[in-house]
Image (cartoon, grey):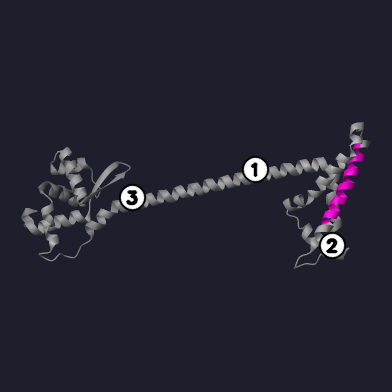
């Protein structure tokens, strides 16, 4: 028997399931007759045999679902030798399944369906968690961009550049801004706020709001100011180009002209 199992383990298990299914189906049929079954049930013994065979061949699935290593013990592994007597335990499982075939099949089917449902729920939950993680990453990214936009003008304002040599073409840049633009840039550069509103700047420079907005558009085109949309609306900030323009105008006109 040991040579039969070690040489052809799969065929041995199939033979056991086949034999146990037939015997168990027959036992189930005769038990039904003893409990007062009708003649119609007695006539269809083949049906009980077929159901018994189906239940017997479902035993490996049942063993796998309960994480049993019975089949590995019968076949043997590279770490342990085969245990031929375990085939009797396997045959007992198949025989019990065949005798109680209807209840066994119904219970196992329900369990399989429940596990499939649980697997789908877990997959759906994992997908939702991944989506939430993606949204959090995006939110952190937006927060980082927002903080960078807020501190960028401050860092630029506090960083000293190398002085430009006199006579350099860059010194002519102060001619690009007029007096009103200079006032706007100076108000933004001297303010304690890095991000300004148009209304706040208008109060400081005494320029009409409509005209001020047009001036900001011009400065934006010259890359001397920037704007961004925040939670509280549009905010304006001075760029390094605007700071350079103020410094160059001061160098060109002197302190009195600034």
* The stretch drawn in magenta includes residue 156: no
- Lower sequence index among marks 2 and 3: 2
Residue 38 shows in the view: no
- Lower sequence index among marks 1 and 3: 1
Q: Residue at x 84, y 62 (%)?
A: 5
**Nearer the camera: disc 2 or disc 3:** 2
Give left or right: position of 151 versus 21.
left
The one nearer the camera, 97 or 147, is 97
- Lower sequence index among marks 1 and 2: 2
Residue 143 screen position, x and y as percent: 37, 50
Residue 134 screen position, x and y as percent: 46, 49
Q: CA distance from mark 1 to mark 3?
A: 43 Å
**Nearer the camera: disc 1 or disc 2:** 2
Q: Residues within 10 Å of mark 1 (few under 14, many from 20)?
A: few
Q: Circle 3 — which element?
A: helix
Residue 176 screen position, x and y as percent: 13, 52
Q: Which residues are magenta?
A: 13-32
Residues at marks 1 and 2 touching, judged by CB atoms closer than 8 Å: no
Please tell me the numbered disc located at residue 5. Answer: 2
In the image, residue 80 above or below residue 138: below
**Nearer the camera: disc 1 or disc 3:** 1
Q: Residue at x 41, y 48 (%)?
A: 139
Secondary structure character of the magenta stretch overall: helix
Q: CA distance from mark 1 to mark 2?
A: 37 Å
Q: Residue at x 36, y 52 (%)?
A: 144
Q: Residue at x 83, y 65 (%)?
A: 7
Task: Find disc 3 in the rendering and name its residue.
Answer: 146
């Amino acid at each position: 028997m040991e040579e039969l199992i070690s040489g052809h383990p799969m065929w041995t298990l199939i033979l056991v399931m086949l034999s146990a299914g037939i015997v168990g189906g027959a036992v189930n049929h005769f038990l039904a007759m003893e409990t007062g079954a009708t003649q119609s049930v007695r006539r269809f013994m083949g049906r009980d045999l077929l159901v018994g065979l189906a239940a017997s061949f479902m035993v490996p699935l049942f063993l796998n679902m309960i994480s049993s290593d019975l089949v590995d013990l019968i076949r043997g592994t590279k770490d342990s030798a085969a245990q031929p007597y375990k085939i009797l335990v396997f045959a007992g499982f198949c025989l019990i399944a065949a005798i109680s075939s209807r209840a066994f099949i119904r219970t196992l089917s329900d369990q399989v369906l429940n596990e499939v449902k649980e697997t789908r729920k877990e997959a759906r939950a994992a997908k939702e968690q991944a989506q939430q993680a993606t949204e959090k990453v995006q939110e952190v990214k937006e927060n980082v961009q927002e903080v960078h936009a807020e501190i960028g003008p401050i860092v630029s304002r506090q960083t000293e550049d190398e002085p430009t040599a006199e006579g350099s073409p860059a010194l002519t840049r102060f001619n690009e801004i007029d007096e009103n633009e200079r006032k706007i840039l100076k108000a933004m550069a001297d303010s304690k706020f890095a991000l300004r509103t148009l209304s706040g700047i208008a109060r400081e420079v005494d320029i009409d709001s409509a005209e001020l907005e047009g001036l900001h558009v011009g400065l934006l085109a010259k890359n001397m100011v920037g704007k961004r949309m925040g939670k509280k609306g549009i905010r304006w900030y001075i760029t390094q180009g605007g700071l350079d323009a103020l410094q160059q105008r001061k160098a060109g006109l002197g302190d009195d002209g600034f």
